[in-house]
């Protein structure tokens, strides 16, 4: 259980997936990283502050998009578990669409993104698979990790933008759209 920030060292591939379990008193001092971060709050609630933006409370089932070079601070509001995806800016050059996807994510008015329940399961599964691939030295492990990182960015950009609670018909329409786009995934 963490009460200090996880030390992130990017491997030669430039991408790492990490899990950080917080004790509830976690408070990260302001920092600036040379890599991009996507933080997924699995459980709990964190606060996020960044110069020039209003502070955000980020509950479980939400993501944070933190571009490289941005001074930011994270603290626990409630004991939390985070999944972190950290990658060098060079990763975005691996595919011609990745810079556009990242630009769409970073140009949103808020750094946090609420993730619908079915997509949460999909994202958590991809994160766990990427962490497992990192621990095992199987053929194609880094290709799989890059694919999973790119897939998470695609998933985030394709999610409908929401600004809080919506009416029942809007939620039903969103679920119907998600089923249409992910009919091949297992649904409960």
Image (tube, rainbow, N blue to C red):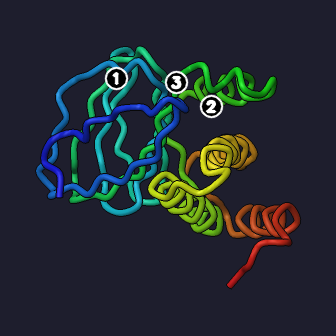
Q: Secondary structure at mark 2?
A: helix
- Locate the C terminus by quadrant: bottom right
* Neighbours of disc 1 within 10 Å: few (<14), some (14-19), many (20+): some
Residue 184: quarter of image: bottom right
Between disc 3 and disc 1, the foreground one is 3
| Structural distance between the alpha carbons of marks 3 and 1 | 20 Å
**Labels 3 & 1 near each other (Cβ < 8 A):** no
Earlier-in-chain disc, 2 versus 1: 1
Q: Secondary structure at mark 3?
A: loop
Q: Which residue is mark 2?
A: 105
The residue lying at 54 percent from left, 44 percent from top is: 113
**Labels 2 & 1 near each other (Cβ < 8 A):** no
Is residue 22 among the parts visible in the rendering?
yes
In the image, is 149 to the left or to the right of 26? right
Earlier-in-chain disc, 3 versus 1: 1
Marks counted in the figure total 3
Q: Which residue is mark 3?
A: 88
Q: Which residue is mark 1?
A: 50
| Structural distance between the alpha carbons of marks 2 and 1 | 16 Å
| Structural distance between the alpha carbons of marks 2 and 3 | 16 Å
């Amino acid at each position: 259980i963490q009460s200090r920030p996880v030390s992130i060292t990017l491997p030669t591939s430039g991408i790492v997936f990490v899990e950080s379990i917080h004790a509830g008193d976690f408070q990260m001092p302001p920092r600036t990283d040379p890599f991009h971060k996507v933080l997924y709050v699995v459980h709990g609630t964190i606060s996020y502050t960044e110069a020039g933006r209003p502070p955000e409370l980020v509950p479980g089932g939400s993501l944070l998009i933190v571009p490289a070079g941005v001074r930011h601070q994270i603290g626990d509001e409630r004991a939390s578990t985070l999944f972190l995806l950290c990658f060098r800016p060079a990763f975005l050059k691996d595919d011609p669409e990745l810079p556009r996807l990242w630009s769409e994510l970073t140009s949103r008015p808020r750094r946090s993104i609420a993730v619908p329940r079915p997509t949460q399961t999909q994202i958590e599964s991809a994160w766990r698979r990427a962490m497992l691939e990192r621990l095992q030295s199987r053929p194609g492990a880094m290709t799989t990790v890059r694919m999973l990182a790119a897939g998470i960015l695609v998933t985030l950009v394709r999610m409908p933008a929401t600004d809080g609670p919506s009416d029942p018909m809007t939620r039903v329409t969103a679920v119907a759209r998600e089923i249409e786009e992910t009919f091949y995934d297992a649904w409960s």
